[in-house]
Each structure stands twice: as C-alpha cells, then as structure tokens.
C-alpha cells in the first residue's frame, strides 16, 4: 500500500513537472482557438458592412481563425449592439458599428438596452466618415459663411430648410450645429436617403442639405449641387477644392462619423491586446488603407483609450445639441 502511494505521489510530481515544461494547460491556450463572430447591425451592402468584411478577412489571416460577419439589423442598430453586449466576454463575439451606436443614440435616447461606457470594451476606431454641407445651385451663396449669413438674415429668407435623414441622424446634428454657428433657426426636412435628399436639392424643395461624402461627391463634381464645406480636420480627396468648416471659421460644426470595433465588457485584457495588435497591423497595410479610402472613408487606427476619449466627448457634445434643438428619439 505504501509503495503504491509513493508511486502515485511520484507520478503526480512528474505530471506537474511535465506541465511546467510544456507550458500552461489547454484551458489557457493562446486566443483564438475557434471562429470569431463579427456582428454588423446593418443589412449587407452598406459602408459598415464593407468595412466589417474587409476587417474580417484580414483578421482571419492575422489570427489564424475564421472571422465570420453576421448581419443583425434593426432598431437603428440596437438589436445587434444588444446581442454583443449580452454575449460571453471571451473574444469570440465582436461588434463593428458606426458612431450612431456608441454616441448618437445614447446621447439622444433615454432608454437603451446597453450602455456604451459599461457594456463594451473598446478595441479600435478604424475609419472616419466626414459629411458635407450642400446647397442648391439657385441659392445665392458660394461659401459656407455666405450660407450662414443668409440663414441668419430673416429679411433675405432666413430660417432656411435643410435636408436630413431623419431626427437624430448625422445630417440632422450637423445641420443643427451649423444653425447654432449661424445664430439662426433652420427647419430640418427628413428624407429616406441620399438619393431623395439630392433630388430635393436639385428641384429646389430645400435650400441646403447634409449628406455623406461618398454619396454627395459625384453629384457635386457633376455640378448638380454645390458643396460648401466638409466636417473634419482636413479636406477630403473626393472633394479637394471644398474647404473644411474649420477653414471656413466654423469649428463648432464638427461631427465626423466613424466605425469602431468593440468586444463585450469584461473581455480578458490579453484577448483585447491580441485584437488590438492585429487591428493596428491591418490598418497600417497600404492595401487596406486604399480599400477604405475607395469607400470615401478615411482609414485610421485609434486605440482603445482614444476610442473611449472620442466617445465621451461626443456623448457630451451631442447631448448638448439635442437639448438645444429639442431632439429626442424616445
């Protein structure tokens, strides 16, 4: 009996020694060990979906596991965002969405099934999406400053109508920022999308409109509408002759959309570090940067802390815009 106990003890010691030699047990093996799901809260085919599929393809190569895009649209991105917020925090369910999910909705909607601060671990922002202020060709303005003066001048038809994609959309917020900078009250007119908005501009239904650069640039280059200014810190390649609002002396018109990658809160830091390194490498790839630029987006790499700082600033800014313009999404 004693001999058997000694043998068992020696066997246990040998196993421990072998484990120490070979490394950590399988439960702590390097991430990832299986396929990763990347949730996109939009239907296939849009810019968010295109960025997600580009990122998923490159992540698969970097991590050695399949990264599968799953489209879960609905409720202005809330359905997909909530699904990821409630997922296991193990790094195998991620979310790629636009800033609407992380800042616009939380700033303007009082009840959401997630909190962008506490429901997610921020990984990186990978693209910026500036927007452009447009004017109908019949409007007697050539610059954004002239448009601001006209909007402010009630005797000259001030209180201009401008096109948006509906309450709380990026065009709506930018329009309200512009109205505030001009010291004017302007009337937002909602449209279902870019095509309807530009058609309304061309037809003279509205004086101004705010649209994405990708949609508006071809119409502006063709002379169908006039581009007055773009948001962001520098001009965009698609409209190189159009100044920024900063250049035009209206730095308060500052909204730039963006695309951010997150994991559920409480995802282990080593997993987040692995994802962050992979995304940093991917966004430094010239081929990837060209592909993102071809979508009329600006490729960037802003890490988790920069993501969080931008999110906090926008939550404050959009909350103030919403209160000032009485924009509520409830």
Image (spheres, helix red, strand yellow):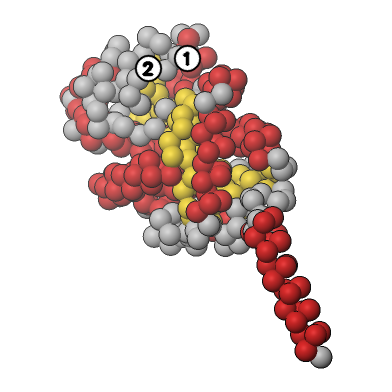
Disc 2: which residue: 235
User: Residue at the spot x=43%, y=44% of the render?
Assistant: 304
What quarter of the picture does the N terminus occupy?
bottom right
Q: Is residue 88 above or below residue 219?
A: below
Q: From the viewer's perspective, is residue 103 above or below residue 221?
A: below
Q: Identify which residue is drawn at 25% across, 32% down.
A: 252
Seen as rendered, the residue at the extreme front is 3
Q: Is residue 149 left or right of residue 305?
A: left
Left or right: 206, with 322 as reference point: right
Q: Residue furthest bottom?
A: 1
Q: Position of residue 46 (x, y in %)?
A: 61, 33
Vertically, is 266 above or below 250? below
Residue at (76, 85) in percent of width and height: 5
Front-most of 207 and 113? 113
- The image shows residue 57 at horizontal and vertical percentages of 68, 34
Q: How many marks?
A: 2
Q: Is residue 311 visible?
A: no
Of 312 and 287, nearer the camera is: 287
76 is higher (above) or lower (below) than 287: below
Picture quadrant of residue 306: top left
Label 1: few (<14), some or many (≥20) within 10 Å? some
Q: Residues within 10 Å of mark 2 (few under 14, many from 20)?
A: some
Return the residue at label 1: 238
């Amino acid at each position: 009996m004693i001999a058997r106990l000694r043998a068992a003890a020696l066997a246990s010691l040998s196993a421990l020694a072998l484990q120490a030699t070979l490394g950590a047990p399988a439960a702590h093996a390097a991430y990832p060990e299986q396929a990763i799901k990347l949730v996109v809260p939009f239907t296939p085919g849009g810019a968010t979906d295109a960025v997600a599929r580009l990122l998923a393809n490159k992540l698969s190569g970097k991590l050695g596991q399949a990264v599968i895009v799953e489209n879960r649209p609905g409720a202005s991105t809330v359905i997909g965002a909530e699904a990821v917020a409630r997922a296991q925090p193990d790094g195998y369910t991620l979310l790629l969405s636009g800033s609407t999910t992380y800042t616009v909705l939380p700033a303007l909607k009082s009840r959401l099934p997630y909190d962008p601060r506490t429901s997610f671990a921020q990984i990186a922002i990978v693209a910026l999406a500036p927007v452009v202020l447009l004017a109908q060709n019949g409007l007697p303005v050539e610059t954004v400053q002239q448009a601001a003066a006209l909007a402010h001048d009630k005797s000259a038809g001030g209180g201009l109508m401008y096109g948006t994609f509906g309450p709380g959309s990026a065009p709506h917020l930018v329009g309200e920022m512009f109205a505030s900078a001009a010291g004017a009250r302007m009337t937002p007119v909602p449209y279902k999308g870019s095509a309807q908005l530009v058609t309304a501009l061309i037809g003279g239904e509205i004086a101004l409109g705010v649209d994405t650069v990708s949609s508006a640039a071809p119409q502006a280059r063709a002379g169908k509408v006039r581009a007055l200014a773009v948001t962001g810190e520098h001009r965009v390649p698609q409209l190189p002759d159009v100044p920024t609002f900063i250049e035009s002396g209206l730095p308060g018109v500052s909204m730039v959309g963006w695309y951010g990658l997150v994991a559920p809160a409480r995802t282990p830091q080593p997993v987040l570090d692995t994802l962050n390194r992979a995304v940093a490498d991917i966004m430094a790839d010239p081929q990837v940067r060209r592909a993102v630029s071809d979508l009329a987006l600006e490729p960037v790499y802003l890490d988790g802390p920069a993501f969080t700082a931008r999110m906090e600033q926008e939550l404050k800014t959009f909350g103030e815009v919403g209160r000032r313009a009485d924009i509520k999404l409830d």
